[in-house]
Amino acid sequence: MGNLLPKISVVIPLFNKESYIERAISSIRIQDIADIEIIVIDDGSTDNGKNIVEAIPDGRIKVISQENQGVSVARNAGINAATSDLIAFLDSDDEWKPGFLQTIFSLRERFPNAGAYGTSYETPVRGGKTYRPIFDGLPQGWEGILPSYFRSSFGMHVLHTSAVAIPKAVFDTVGGFKIGEKLGEDLDMWLRIALRFPIAYSNVQQSVYHQEAGNRTDGLPVSVDKLPYLIRAEEMLRSGCVPDHIRDDLIDYVASRKIGYAKRFIKLGQSANARLLLAEIKSKRFAQKKQLWLLLSFIPKIFFELLRSLKWHVYSVSKSMQKYINSTKVK
């Protein structure tokens, strides 16, 4: 690269992921883009992950060590250390497909004023299968400026920390990742960006989101008072600072998130917490779903589990029948 700045800086927070970090970095090194700066923030790991990174023969890799302070501090440290004007993120147990960076740069060339550039992602699941999320209003293969980040994220979130790149200047406007929040620090960032900037997106799976690592926070139980990004979204709505063309979608987005957390509470047997969340929902779009989960919250956990088992049994049988029907069709 000589004295030229890298086209993109990649920030990888690392904490006790020795079994996965080499895979993550390998997925960066096989990209068609060579002008890359790889910044690994070792967040006080106690395993061999840092040594594995330092043994990789690639001068583009920079390792920064800090005491364990959490993923937000690590990402912010990477942002501060980055020398490129575009910063991508990759969790240390995830990976990119070979075309990820080409897609990101194509989006940036077409939409230079966007506040974030993202792609879809896929998740390996049991039985060797792969889950690919479906986003509201976005057909597979679609590319462009998201009509509404919030509407597209009613189900799975359209942006993911291992499938996004953000211009460094955007952080000067919206700030860094929130520190001390173990749930939704990334969702809070996308929220702040989406309220101020258009988001360019490719609905092609160019990143792989792995869930087998042991120290992820995805499955941790939540409590009603530990949803700070939703609390801030509601504060913005009450303050009147949300643009009119976004307001209804943001109201519905908050409702969809609360219903999702209410489901988790019910599955954990914490129905009272679920009812507290559901009672706060004002969205007309999700009124029927709210009433359904309010009803389910009064069902004892053992019967709720039976209902879930029956649902999946019916689904499995119907899928098997459909496969049989398809196999007997005359071509």
Image (cartoon, rainbow, N blue to C red):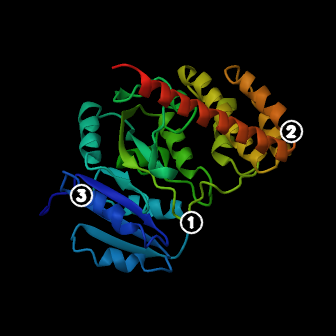
Which part of the image, by quadrant, shows the C terminus? top left
Estimate the spatial distance between the alpha carbons at disc 2 and disc 1, rounded to whole Å: 32 Å
What amino acid is found at the position of numbered circle 1 in the picture?
Asn
Q: Residue at x 51, y 27 (%)?
A: 322
- For mark 1, what is the residue? 215
First-in-chain label (2 vs 1): 1
Reply above or below: 12 against 164. Answer: below
Q: Residue at x 37, y 19 (%)?
A: 330
Q: Is residue 269 left or right of residue 289?
A: right
Reply above or below: 2 against 43. Answer: above
* Label 3, residues with CA under 10 Å away: few <14, some 14-19, many ≥20: many
First-in-chain label (3 vs 2): 3
Callout in the foreground (3, 1): 1
Q: Residue at x 23, y 66 (%)?
A: 60
Q: Which mark is residue 36?
A: 3
Q: Can residue 239 be seen by looking at this rendering? A: no
Q: Is residue 325 left or right of residue 117?
A: right
What amino acid is found at the position of numbered circle 3 in the picture?
Ile
